Image: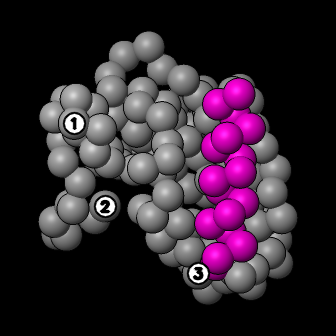
Amino acid sequence: MSAGQPEQNLSHPAALSAGLPLRLYGLKKRSEFLAAARAPRIATPGFVLQARKRDEGAEIRVGFTCSKKVGNSIARNRAKRRLRALARLILPTDGHAGTDYVLIGRAGNTGERDFKMMQDDLRRALRKLSS
């Protein structure tokens, strides 16, 4: 998702028609995060997931946040790196097109929880939000 890395996913119109994984785009503006904060959310042991269905666009947009409750800057950055890796693995295939997702780190758990368990948590949370 950074500027210098090539994306492995295809662009959204072709991906939608072929049933291939979608490309992830980042949430950048505070207003986008605030809109997602008013949307439904699911709390898991490792993170909180907020999901807002948009009317426009077919892409999946994702944002990450960790407050100072998570820990010092080293702990917050580690938690955000893990959340970004989690989103890159799961959201292109299991996320829904036209949706904004915000993953929020939780104190003590996001940086320490087993990554496989976090993957299962995200898949379960996505299923709950889609039903």
98 or 19, which is in the foreground? 19
Foreground label between 3 and 1: 1
What's drawn in magenta, residue-wise? 115-131
Kindly report the distance in space between the C-alpha atoms of the residues bearing marks 3 and 1.
35 Å
Residue 6, image x, y percentages: 16, 65
Residue at 71% in and 73% down: 117
Q: Farthest residue to the front: give it.
A: 18
Assign a secondary structure to mark 3.
Answer: helix
Task: Describe residue 18's horizontal placement relative to residue 48 as left or right.
Answer: left
Residue at 71% in and 51% down: 124
Residue at 62% in and 35% down: 51
Q: Which mark is residue 78?
A: 3
Q: Earlier in the sequence, mark 3 or mark 1?
A: 1
Residue 21, image x, y percentages: 32, 48
On the image, numbered disc 2 is attached to which residue? 1
Q: Residues within 10 Å of mark 3 (few under 14, many from 20)?
A: some
Q: Amino acid at mark 1?
A: Ala
Task: Describe residue 36's horizontal placement relative to residue 3 as left or right.
Answer: right
Q: Earlier in the sequence, mark 2 or mark 3?
A: 2
Magenta span: predominant SS is helix
Are the two marked residues, 2 and 1, in contact with CB atoms closer than 8 angstroms?
no
Residue 102, image x, y percentages: 59, 46
Q: Which mark is residue 18?
A: 1
